[in-house]
Amino acid sequence: MRAKNPMAAITFFGIGFLSLAGICLPQSTDGQAVRLQKPLEHEVSVTLKLIQVYVTDKSGKPVTHLDQSAFRVYDNGVLQAITEFEKHMSPETGTVGAETPAKEALVPTEPGAPRLGRKFFVLIDLDANDLEGIAKSRAAAIQFLDTQTLPSDEIGVFSSSFMRGIVLHCYLTTDHAKVREAIQRIREVPGRKSGGTGDASTPTIAVSGQGTGTMTIAVVSRGGGLNTDRMMALAKALRYIPGYKNILYFSQGGPINNRAYRDRLEEMSREFAASNAPFYAINTETPDPFNPGGTKGEALLAFVAEKTGGKAFKEIGAIVHFPDIAREIQELTRNYYVLGFPVKETWDGKYHKIKVELTSGDYHLQSQPGYYNPKPFRDYSDLEKDLHLFDLAMTEKTEPPLPLMFAMRVLAFEQKGEAHVLMLSKIPTDVVEKFLTKKVEVVSLIFDEQDNAVERRQIKPDLSKFRGMDLFYSSDAALGPGTYRCRIIVRDLDTGDAALAYARAVVPAKPGAGGSASALTLLSPLLLAAGSNFAYLDDQTKKNTAPWMDFYVYDRAKFSPLTGELALGAKAIYVLLPFSLAGAAPGDISISASLIDTTSGTNLSIPLGLLSKARKGNIELQLAELAVEGIAAGKYILYIRAEEAGKKAVVYAQVPISIRQP
């Protein structure tokens, strides 16, 4: 399924994202699965449950000297054996009012990556804010990011508005530069401030145009003010992210003017508390000498913060003192213990109440009140399934468990004068077999340089007819010049098991008046391999001829795209070369090819034989055979050089290629 235009609302994944975090994924270039993730669903297993605990003395100072023996943990009233223990303590950052400390001074005492690090979500309430409040919210969030976070802290960014719902601008990431960019891009018109949720419909996930040609995803629900339906959907979606998720809530709040609204707020707050997501609510309202009482928003801020286990900085003008507030939030969240205990994990989605006690000492202890067992993927809500898909597409994990990986190649081509990006993947036999009898979906996604989602397609194919075969899937989109990140995900709709392919694409700008005068252009070559034991998933769709198939024309019964590694010992590969001639006469292009060893830099000239050529409009398509027999295993760059006879016009293309050991 594809969005027909940027303004069309369609079902999509995630709470929504205007901006997505930077991606760090393991490299894979062959057509085989490189690692299988831990199954999302199983009957019973033993897992390590991790709990964050904060301990302070009577003056509110963190207690940092405790060891494992100082704690007792109860799960649903049953005493647990603590088998894992971590202490995360940062050095003093100075007293309130002191000069803002340098970020480099904030370092954890534990070496290496923590099992359970700090997590923050910035949530800017666009409805309960004015222009000045939104600007101050952005500045405060960036100040917190720059001065009060550790390199290991994961940060995400939300905004909330009546018109667009809850939008996730940046998923949890340790790439703080990406977080900064996401915060700076929040440029919205402030909304009205009113209590209550109105006649809210069930929240759904939708894609809507921004008016800039990009897309944003939002939870759509009617109503105004702090929409408790939207917020409860968000709270439930946060359940399965481990540890505390501290919410920095920037808002001018609002009155709680009726019991029904208060009850909904309390229910919403309980959901956030159960998801271990306390609110640190900061009043962004600027004092008005003509209205000294302000908008009476303190009540909502105080209520939500208290009920979620956080703290409210509710006074009008509090945002002016944000450096002090930021240091206090840092003090409240930076020093903590992690307690781990084994549990038999069942997939029933039930809530477990956690109680943590100290064996000695007159201290104040705060810990997460509980956790939810995982539940079968088939029982996930649409929102939870979408967040799972979002996490697959944008994960930064480089440690197992990781998704099953397969290969993808990305090409740029022209269609009716428009630049297109083609995602072409080979889903190998072992991956096809894994999903053969399953109800699956295949989703393709493209993100631009600002991490806006600019394209999405989804199909639900029947894979049962492809036993023992490699399967090719493609998706293309008309895009402007720029760099894009591409994803293809195959997912079991019953268990959540998934396989993933990823790549980057570059669409070059067309030469302007000052550009090259050459009429010859070499577009993205398509590598092919001989073979017959494969099928094209595109043939299952109603649209049997995709735009790229009209452009890259070859014998699909004889050749298949080479998207991954070439087996050592192969005698030849084939390359389809699309030339944009812009009036040049056919038959006046000479071609040569070589392989450049990326390790040694050695340039190996390889024989090239022209098999066929055809012209359609201003595009000439040439099919050539490259002799690669005897080439050693390794990683290479295929360098193709083309020259227009008599015009001294030379164009070239480079294609990465790997030859693997058998």
Image: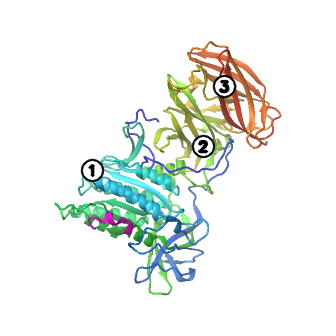
Residue where numbered disc 2 is placed? 501
Q: Nearer the viewer, residue 564 or 513?
A: 513
**How many tags in the picture?**
3
Residue 546, image x, y percentages: 54, 27
Helix or strand or loop: what does disc 2 sit on?
strand
Query: Up-down: is 364 above or below 310?
Result: below
Helix or strand or loop: what does disc 1 sit on?
loop
Residue 211, image x, y percentages: 36, 37
Q: From where the camera sits, is residue 372 visible?
A: yes
Residue at the extreme right: 630
Q: Nearer the viewer, residue 516 or 121?
A: 516
Determine whether, in the image, residue 653 is placed left or right of residue 66.
Answer: right
Residue at the extreme left: 290
Which numbered tag is attached to residue 191?
Answer: 1
Pick whichever of labels 1 and 3 is earlier in the sequence: 1
Residue at the extreme top: 585
Residue 254, image x, y percentages: 25, 60
Q: Would you say the magenta stretch is mainly helix, strand or loop?
A: helix
In the image, which is nearer the foreground, mark 2 or mark 1?
1
Q: Amino acid at mark 3?
A: Leu
Q: Amino acid at mark 1?
A: Gly
Pick whichever of labels 2 and 1 is earlier in the sequence: 1
Quick one: label 2, few (<14), some, or many (20+) residues within 10 Å? many
Residue 322, image x, y percentages: 36, 65
Magenta stretch bounds: 315-324
Residue lying at 61% horizontally and 22% vertically, measured from the top left: 579
Pick whichever of labels 2 and 3 is earlier in the sequence: 2
Determine whether, in the image, residue 418 is placed left or right of residue 610.
Answer: left
Helix or strand or loop: what does disc 3 sit on?
strand
Residue where numbered disc 3 is placed? 576
Task: Measure how far apart labels 1 and 3 are at the Cα level.
Answer: 54 Å
Does the magenta-highlighted stretch encompass residue 316? yes
